[in-house]
Amino acid sequence: MTDNSDGIGGLTFDKSKRSWPNEFNIFFALIIIIVIFEALGQILPYMNDQSFLFDTKDRFDTIFNEARLKIIILQVAIIGIIALGVTQVIITAGIDLSSGPLVAATAMVAMSFAQTELVNGNPNPKALFGTWAMDLPVVVPVVIGLVFGAFIGAINGTFIAFLRIPPFIATLGMFLVCRGIALWWSSGNPISFPTESYKFIGSGMMPVVWFLSLAVIFHIIMKYTVYGKHTYAIGSNEDAARMSGINVKRHKVMVYMIASMLAAFAGIVLSAKASTAQAGMGEFYELFAIAMAVIGGISLTGGRGSIIGTVLGAMVLGVIRSGFTFIKLDGSYQLMAMGSIIIAAVILDQYRQRNRA
Amino acid sequence: MSSEIVLKTENLTKHYGGVHALVGANFEMKKGEHVAIMGDNGAGKSTFVRQITGVEQRTSGTVSLYGEEVNFTGPLDARQAGIETVFQTLALADDLDVPDNLFLGRELTKWNWLGPFRRLDYKAMREATMQGLVKTGVKIPNIKNSIQNMSGGQRQCVAIARTATFASKLTIMDEPTAALGVQETAQVENIIRNMKEQGAPLILVSHNMRQVFDLVDRIVVFRRGRIVANLNKDETDGQDVVAYITGVKTGAEYEGAA
């Protein structure tokens, strides 16, 4: 089939010639960070030779410190759900700053339809609506929350795709609007006491189950469907995508809608986990979600990155957070370290791009 | 005989405000013919191409494809009608590989009931890509490579293979070798010869006299927005063409036009 007679090069399809996937690099970075904390546990005098991830209690049934592993992934699961959507937005060369406040707004909206009528035999002290909105089946608040998210996403997408407002500005505006909605919805009062079935959505390891199953679903969608291919194409070369017949505007609206629905779902899970909804919820979530994507190798210039990368990026953030707690450094150091790592990730990404060109 | 005429324009005119970029262009090409469009910068070559491919809307005149009058509202319309264009700025997505780019916007899919989430048929697209590349004689070391890892010549070849793979009724190339090296230019020219053998009609916009004489049957010269010559390759030479381009001569049938 191939013909090399003119010496310019043959025509081959060679799987072994695939370039080194960036996900491996992030995975190695994750391992290195774990090793560093493991070593610090042995070296630092006040740590008494504790192990970061391994079980040191000499029980025979486990190798790893399961409690810590669970906490690491549970801590990042809810923001991770947002990051799955933000990843898609960034791949189209956009950005979504509105997801954090949208988490709070959705938590308020959904929770107000998830309240239970009687708390220990007394009327719900935090009741927002009348009894008609009490003890509804769990699908009602979930669907209302997701529709609310889709609505916000549709507005974001319409402003960005049809009115050509830069994504940064459009979603910055929506950031404030959503925080406003969250405060206005119940005049700033928390909404509490949800039904048992609503609580279940966020109970125990359920956030992790949601995060990982949504990650698998969106990994498949981004890699194996037309939606995914067009998302990459738009981020890679929007003009080429348009010339090729892709309805770029409609597609962008869809991407922002999906991202906002994921953020809305994160709000539902968060309020279910906390059994309460408050207007101040989800502070900085949008930034941490973007950080997960960036650490995971999603290029801010669009076109490159994967869901696997974002999941690894989420794990990196989770391990750092847990590691700093482990070596007993407080939150202020964590923020400084995370900030440095985000900047380092972008520098590495730019360096790789320059090497390629 | 009308079906033997691939493309025909009558009195094709385009004004940009007060600028008459294209005036009364009458152009015709037959099946299997390769025609070159030559002329100085600003002579109206690209304007002519943009009117045919629907990138811009003409001021007046008609365009017919295979005997039928067409009115394209955009480049997509033209593509669906079978006019494939290799633009000067390559419309390729840098982060995608060769099959992805060939099938961008017209992916082969399975499970179509899933709407936008229908599944990509990677295997079928890969096989069709290989066939298309063999057919056009395009050689690319590894089609799984993303476009950004390719040389300028390889990129151009991908763009050309895309137009050729989709067995279009008419291919238009706007200076396909302007940015390429010697070897890469040779490769692109080979592809064009291949298309000639297969009888695929082509309009080639080029500044390269040697290339034009090597590849095409007929040369149409534009000057200051008008067609000033329609020359058979065998009846002309480089100096003659230059004379038409620079305005020293004007074709008999176009006297008084320019």
Image (cartoon, rainbow, N blue to C red):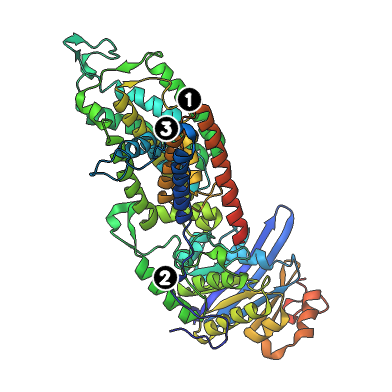
| Amino acid under disc 1 | Val
Image check: B210 left or right of A130?
Answer: right
The residue that disc 1 covers is A177
- Image x and y of residue A316, in percent: 45, 43
Query: Sequence order check: which comes first, mark 1 or mark 3?
Result: 3
Image check: A210 left or right of B200?
Answer: left
CB atoms of marks 2 and 1 within 8 Å: no
Quadrant in the picture for residue A143: top left
On the same chain, marks 2 and 1? The answer is yes
Quadrant in the picture for residue A102: top left
On the same chain, marks 1 and 3? The answer is yes
Element type at mark 2: helix
On the same chain, marks 3 and 2? The answer is yes
Residues A272 and A30: in front is: A30
Residues A79 and A115: in front is: A79
- Image x and y of residue A326, in percent: 43, 33
- Image x and y of residue B186, in percent: 63, 82
Element type at mark 1: helix
The residue that disc 3 covers is A152
Residues A50 and A314: in front is: A50
Image check: A135 left or right of B220?
Answer: left
Nearest to viewer (mark 2 / mark 1): 2
| Amino acid under disc 2 | Lys
Residue A15 numbered tag: 2
| Amino acid under disc 3 | Ile
Q: Is residue A93 above or below residue B211?
A: above
Chain bearing mark 1: A
Q: Which residue is at a point 53% across and 34% down the rendered structure image?
A: A170
Element type at mark 3: helix
CB atoms of marks 3 and 2 within 8 Å: no
Q: Which residue is at a point 50% across and 49% down the rendered structure image?
A: A297
Q: CA distance from mark 2 to mark 1?
A: 48 Å
